[in-house]
């Protein structure tokens, strides 16, 4: 249990009192909040920003989102988020993702949201993955002496404090309070068929052909320029055996069938049109990355295809909050999805359930549907940078695919990722990324057409 070196020296030099809380080592601040048992509203975090004049630290509550337009008006500067690499260079004594919100210790100018000037108590990262700092309001304001105060965040309907829930408790509450959609019958039958190692292309084709709409979509997929098959394709079985292969047909069919469980609008950055576009691109990239890193291509494709189902579940169960989240996503491209979810759901009556984010919610649904463990983990942890644990390689593949897609404006968030670190963790060469990006560009038009047809 320890504070980062510079934070420890700064607080000692200034004679600022604080308490330390020891927690089990975690992979990111989200997990630290859940592990602490402290009210989430007491947690504060820094957002590091930069322009040609240098770095600024904006300090605000964990359950709030920076309002970049307001920040521009307040500072007169066009600030952009620091990259993970820039942050690591500046905070060399801190573990990645655990920068303390005390910029004075690193001689940084600090902006503080006005809501914190009256806080009775704050909790924040100590710079390490196993320690939190608790300060009373007076000590905190001494630690940030000289900071500029202002209205920095998007305001919600009011803030309340609550205790943190574990994911098991979230899953239990979701199942007790809401009618979670069961896996559609056709998707379940396809899932069971894929579990049978002796299943045939004919059996899969017969399942799909019970559904005329899905049959048409699979045939359109097989005939697309994605595969450039030179001959005629007259049946689903031919699509399976000659062009697509058993796994790819099973996975795309299961995705199509599963999405029918949700009633979500088509429009907006989080709507069904963009969901399918993001999912197909991510699945294609994951499959390509898996082929180059020695992982299961079919499983990687399924992880990419289904990783964002939590958004569909949120939209299905809570349409008014989803509409608000969709609108906030449009006007706050610099903010992370997690911070926007905190802004929307942190003030709703469902805050104790939904504060974990759409990724964890999707993982809970996939576990309920008894999907493969890597698919569950990829959905549940894709919002957690620096994840280490079970099925880590599939989580990292989804994260890397999403990071590459952000560069093309595809996906539901655009804050930067540490692409070199993800590439290295998967054992890939940097040159490989250029190759997979060329591949995705070559098929982009066909993926867009397919996504549009699946969303309709």
Image (cartoon, rainbow, N blue to C red):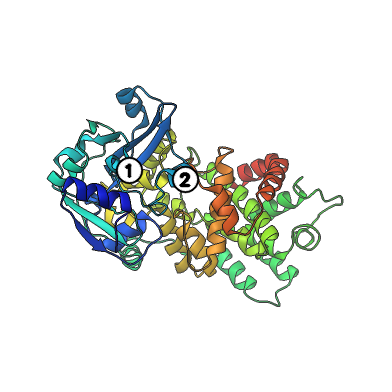
Label 2: how many residues lie within 10 Å, few (<14), some (14-19) or many (20+)?
Answer: some
Which residue is at a point 49% across and 38% down the rendered structure image? 267
* Relative vertical location of residue 419 with respect to residue 249 in this rendering, above or below: above
Label 1: how many residues lie within 10 Å, few (<14), some (14-19) or many (20+)?
Answer: many
* Relative vertical location of residue 31 with respect to residue 322 in this rendering, above or below: below
Q: Where, quadrant-wise, is the C terminus in this rendering?
A: top right
* Relative vertical location of residue 324 with respect to residue 29 in this rendering, above or below: above
Is 343 positioned to the left or the right of 432 in the image? left
* Residue 260 horizontal/vertical position (percent): 52, 55
Q: Which mark is residue 103?
A: none
Badge 2 element: helix
* Residue 259 horizontal/vertical position (percent): 53, 54
**Mark 1 vs mark 2, CA separation in Å:** 13 Å
Q: Where, quadrant-wise, is the N terminus in this rendering?
A: bottom left
Badge 1 element: strand
* Residue 87 horizontal/vertical position (percent): 43, 44
Which residue is at a point 35% across and 54% down the rendered structure image? 29
Q: Which mark is residue 84?
A: 2
* Relative vertical location of residue 333 with respect to residue 434 in this rendering, above or below: above
Is 89 positioned to the left or the right of 60 in the image? right
Is 272 positioned to the left or the right of 64 in the image? right
Evaluate whether residue 429 shows in this view. yes
How many numbered marks, from 0 up? Answer: 2
N-term mark: 1 or 2: 1
Q: Nearer the viewer, residue 217 or 98?
A: 98
Is 184 positioned to the left or the right of 180 in the image? right
Q: Quadrant of residue 434?
A: top right
Q: Which mark is residue 46?
A: 1
* Residue 451 horizontal/vertical position (percent): 62, 45
Q: Nearer the viewer, residue 266 or 21?
A: 21
């Amino acid at each position: 249990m320890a504070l980062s070196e510079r934070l420890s020296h700064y607080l000692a030099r200034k004679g600022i009192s604080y308490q330390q809380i020891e927690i089990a080592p975690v992979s990111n601040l989200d997990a630290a909040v859940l592990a602490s048992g402290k009210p989430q509203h007491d947690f504060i975090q820094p957002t590091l920003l930069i322009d040609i004049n240098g770095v600024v630290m904006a300090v605000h509550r964990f359950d709030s989102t920076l309002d970049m337009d307001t920040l521009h008006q307040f500072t007169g500067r066009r600030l952009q988020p620091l990259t993970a690499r820039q942050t690591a260079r500046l905070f060399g004594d801190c573990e990645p993702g655990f920068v303390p919100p005390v910029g004075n210790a690193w001689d940084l100018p600090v902006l503080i949201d006005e809501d914190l000037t009256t806080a009775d108590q704050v909790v924040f990262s100590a710079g390490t993955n196993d320690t939190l700092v608790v300060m009373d309001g007076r000590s905190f304001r001494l630690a940030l002496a000289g900071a500029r105060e202002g209205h920095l965040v998007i305001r919600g309907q009011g803030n309340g404090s609550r205790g943190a829930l574990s994911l098991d408790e979230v899953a239990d509450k979701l199942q007790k309070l809401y009618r979670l959609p069961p896996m559609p019958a056709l998707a379940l039958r396809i899932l069971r068929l894929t579990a049978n190692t002796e299943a045939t292309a004919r059996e899969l084709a017969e399942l799909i052909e019970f559904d005329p709409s899905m049959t048409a979509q699979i045939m359109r997929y097989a005939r697309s320029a994605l595969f450039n098959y030179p001959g005629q394709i007259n049946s689903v079985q031919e699509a399976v055996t000659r062009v697509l292969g058993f796994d790819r047909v099973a996975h795309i069919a299961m995705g199509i069938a599963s999405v029918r469980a949700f009633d979500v609008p088509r429009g907006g950055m989080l709507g069904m049109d963009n969901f399918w576009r993001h999912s197909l691109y991510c699945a294609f990239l994951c499959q390509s990355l898996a082929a180059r890193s020695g992982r299961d291509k079919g499983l990687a494709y399924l992880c990419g295809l289904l990783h964002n189902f939590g958004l569909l579940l949120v939209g299905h169960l809570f349409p008014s909050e989803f509409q608000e989240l969709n609108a906030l996503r449009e006007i706050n491209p610099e903010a992370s999805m997690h911070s926007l979810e905190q802004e929307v759901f942190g003030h709703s009556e469902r805050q104790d359930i939904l504060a974990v984010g759409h990724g964890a919610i999707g993982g809970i649904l996939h576990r309920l549907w008894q999907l493969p463990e890597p698919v569950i983990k990829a959905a549940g942890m894709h919002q957690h940078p620096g994840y280490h644990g079970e099925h880590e390689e599939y989580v990292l593949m989804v994260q890397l695919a999403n990071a590459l897609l952000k560069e093309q404006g595809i996906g539901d968030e655009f804050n930067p990722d540490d692409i070199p670190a993800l590439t290295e963790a998967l054992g890939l060469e940097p040159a490989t990324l250029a190759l997979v990006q060329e591949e995705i560009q070559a098929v982009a038009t066909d993926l867009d057409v397919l996504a549009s047809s699946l969303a309709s």
